[in-house]
Image: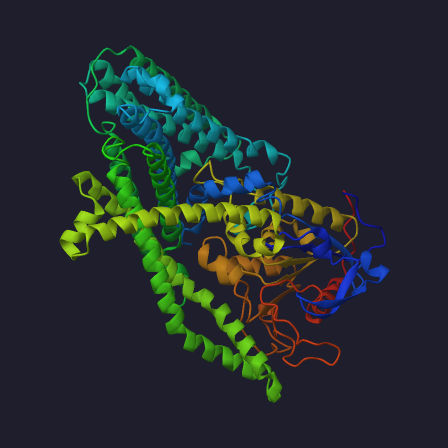
Amino acid sequence: MSGPDTSGEVVELRVHGVSGASAGEVLGLQQTAQVAGDRSGGFYRPRPRCSETTGAHGVTLEAYRWGDLPSGSAARTLAVVFLLPFMLVNVAIWMRPANPGSAATVKSLCRVLALTLTVLYVLAIAGVALDLIGWKCLSSPRCPTGRSWLSWLNERPVGPRLAVLALVPATAIGLIWRISNRPGRTFDAFRAPDQSGSVSRLGTVGQWNAEPLVGRLRSIHVAAAFATLDLTLLLARAAGGATAATIALTVATGVTLTGCVGLLCTPPLIDRAPDDRRLDGITRTLRTAAIVLTIVVLAYLLASPQPWHEGRGLPGYDATLAGLFIAQTTLLVALSVVLLWRRNRERGATPLFGLGALVIAAAGVSLAVAYSAELVYRMADFLDRDVPTGEGIATGPPRAYTWAIFGFFRAVLVTLIVAGLVILISRRGRRRAAAAIVACDYPDPPAEARPRLRQVRDAIARARFTEKLVPLAVLYGCLSGLGTATTTIGLLGHFPGDVIERNAGLPADAVTFGIAFGSWVIAAIILGLIIGGVFAYRTVPYRRHVGVLWDLGTFWPRAAHPFAPTCYAERAVPELTRRITYLVESGHPVLLTGHSHGSVLLAATVLQLPPQVASRVALLTHGSPLRRLYARLFPAYVDDAALHEIGRRVGWRWVNLWRDSDPIGGWIFSAHRSPAPATTSDPAAIVDRRQRDPDDVVTPASDSVPPPIHGHWPDESDEPFTEMVRELVQRLGERADPPVTPT
């Protein structure tokens, strides 16, 4: 990209939010401008030619478009859907409390939880290939009939049959290994060259060379994945009689899994600096040993003459699955204890009651269990199609998966019911608070404005529901953890319907119907996520709603799960830092304007700017979630110290615009609703500027509809935004320091 002209104007660098807007939309360079009406019908005029290169306030406009980094292509967007559980548990590790004493423990617990998701990924595919197809279907007289892709295995012995079908999960491991390895080479050119000297943890986001850590985690997860496959095969082999070879291979597999867990529980080792590669050789050796062990196990299955245990399911599979669920439950309980013990106990500091990491981790585990259970359930239905009752797959999916679907459906149903109750109970209070704001903003309105006043009141009331999501998230996290725990009841041989009928009196058939319905609900959720991913990629307005999860999750580097989607901040933040440094060194003061998540990118960028560059930068944020969401969700990275450091670095040339009608953005330092005093000793007191939304509730004479309610929509064309740009440009011009000489 070419540099700006040499006339020395201020460059306004705009960074969009989660909308994924085009550069023309960010800059306002469309050939027409709307002068009346609304989005459904309006009147447009051609833009003046001068606005094609500069803003109305006389600055050079430039946009940074990052919307394709989290998605970029339909295939990558769909990958995010299927890797969503991995992404959630990766986000959880960044939601640890601000107390530094909890960092090592939370990291270890989150990383081991992430490892259990990889193990579950392998067990789900092994459940389809080895349990449903290799053991149950091929043992049935009718299931292979008419399926030429299976009939060729029907007459083979059990050992060779399982060895061949084990290539399916082995291929799946190799596929996800390759997918996770590609992004590491994509962002190699985007590394922050120098340390900024920031004391804030937020300033390190995007500055790390995260690929060495991801490479270590990747080797550990690949080793654990192959070891899980080996363990599944060896337990099935041992059921028919444990030989010395079986015991030796099982011990070697257990040592491999123990080594993986041990490495993840030593953050000082796994988190070594990028240039310290001593541990890399150990993790690669562990990965190679696991692959070699898998080859040996497959060869052993082909050559072993021992008879196989006859049973209705793959021996040892149900116990392994239940053991994994027990481990996940134990880890979630341990994580909750640590978070509650280390939470911020200051008055008013209750970000998700200190359980943010637990809520997200439990949601990730619950979603992974639901994905796995649905995969096995759908495959079981497919194999049982057109097979008479009693002649198909007799036992169907493992009981643990039945309990998993029941637990997931129960968590979703109870949360939705409670959410409905919270909406009804809190509506009066939210409307009362919104009515007070409306009465203050629009005193003595005319009678014809009453319908519009109600619309404004309802918009503000809906925006205030964001705070009510905190207890709902905690409730869902707790129910998800409970659902994982109840899957272990399957070990006792009980089904949910029988247990509930015996203890609660509800007919077992009704419970069975509910589980079947829950299975289809999970399928609908997965399908909805896929459709949402496609629409988020193709449709800008739709992306505004679903893009929040995508962009929030992929903003943080992969520090827990190496198979999570790539962190776009590894490119965006260094790229912004370099561009701003270039502009300032070329003699152009820079005004940074960031909307929504764009303000978070700019906050991390400002913390990385060299002092001589930051001294010629101003910051304008609007619709910013820094305080309202990020300070609650990520207290160790976004706190008062980090926000004040951002202000000091730009010389407190910072203005934050916020609206009561915005459900995502909000104030950063103070929630004052009247203009701050002109003279104050605290520069942070004048950062936040509240915008009345809408501008008025009366239809102007030049239009046919009242001014729109913007909510979270960007507002670069509004007069308050333009006024703040003029103010910050003037404050940039008041500096007496000469421009920095290019190096």
Figure quadrant of residue 677: bottom right
Figure quadrant of residue 122: top left
Residue 335 seen in the figure: no
Depth order, front residue of 655/738: 655
Residue at screen point 30% across, 15% down: 155
On the image, the x and y values in percent for residue 397 come to 28, 36
Residue 490 seen in the figure: yes
- Please give left or right for residue 329 compared with residue 446 in the image: left
Q: Tell me which colouring the rendered structure shows.
A: rainbow
On the image, the x and y values in percent for residue 196 come to 61, 47
- Please give left or right for residue 294 compared with residue 3 in the image: left
Placement of the C terminus among the 4 image quadrants: top right
On the image, the x and y values in percent for residue 455 come to 55, 76
Depth order, front residue of 460/552: 460
Residue at screen point 39% across, 39% down: 114
On the image, the x and y values in percent for residue 554 come to 52, 45
Placement of the N terminus among the 4 image quadrants: top right
Q: Is residue 399 above or below residue 430?
A: above
Question: Number of marks in the image?
Answer: 0
